[in-house]
Amino acid sequence: MSFRKYIFAFLMTAAIFGTAMYISNTLNQKKLDEVRTIEDKLSLNILSGETQSELLRETSCKDVKNTFLTHELGDLGAKLSYAASQNSPDNAEVLNLKQYYYLLEIKDYLLMKNITAKCGIRPTFILYFYGDKSVCPDCEKTGFVLDALHEKYPDLRIYSFDYTSLEPAVKTLIGIYHVENRLPALIVNSDPFYGFKTLDTMENNIGAIHLLKVEYDKAQAASSTESTTTPNR
């Protein structure tokens, strides 16, 4: 009887262990399949983006402000913000989405540099490097200032990147511009600026942005003069 009890206990333990292993392997496989699906989708999207970027290199100068990447970035940025708010920052899907977003930003940045050079346009580009609140308490405020700048000057192109991102292309960008770990960090037309800056400070003390302000003020003054000199009908 004692021998039978040992056999029964052994069989029960083996069955429980086997069931647990089967469930664990099944769940792990399911997660791996989900990751592969996401990776395949991102690879396809990146390939599509590369193909369309090559086509856009032939765009005419009159269409320079209307590239498909601009709209794609807006759509993806909204999805990324929503996904990040609903999931953990370490969520695999969120991280993959961030990676694709960064690659798309860099691609748009390079594309616009080529197009504007071809068209003889002098644009203003801002590369914004940020971190989470624990390492950069002023990054959130800087984000609000940059939003206000973009709203005031729609032609200003702003690209944001997590300084701690493991994406090789982001690390390469940091290396090219020698961006120091002093966040928030801004690269404005290749010139570095560190620390939080108010809207007024950026408009008056950063040359490229000050030129935008001068042009904006001239346009506003011209519009005001035209409206006061136009006779009422």
Image (spheres, rainbow, N blue to C red):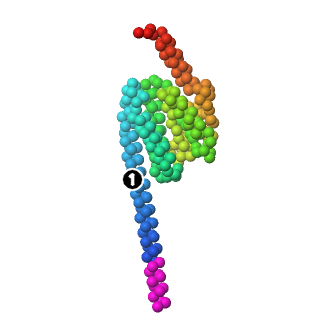
Q: Position of residue 22 (x, y in %)?
A: 42, 69
Residue 206 higher or lower than 25, as above or below: above
- Residue visible at 54% across and 31% down in the picture: 148
Tell me if residue 42 is in the magenta stretch.
Answer: no
- Residue visible at 53% across and 41% down in the picture: 161
Q: Where is residue 146 in the image (x, y as percent from the top left)?
A: 55, 33
Residue 47 higher or lower than 21, as above or below: above
Report which residue position mark 1 lands on.
37
Q: Position of residue 37 (x, y in %)?
A: 39, 53
Using the rendered image of the protein, determine whether residue 58 is visible from the camera's viewpoint.
yes
Q: Relative to the observer, which residue lies in front, 156 or 1? A: 1
Q: Which stretch did the figure color magenta? A: 1-13
Tell me if residue 12 is in the magenta stretch.
Answer: yes
Q: Position of residue 159 (x, y in %)?
A: 51, 36
Q: Relative to the observer, which residue lies in front, 103 or 227? A: 227
Q: Which amino acid does label 1 sit on?
A: Thr
Residue 160 higher or lower than 30, as above or below: above
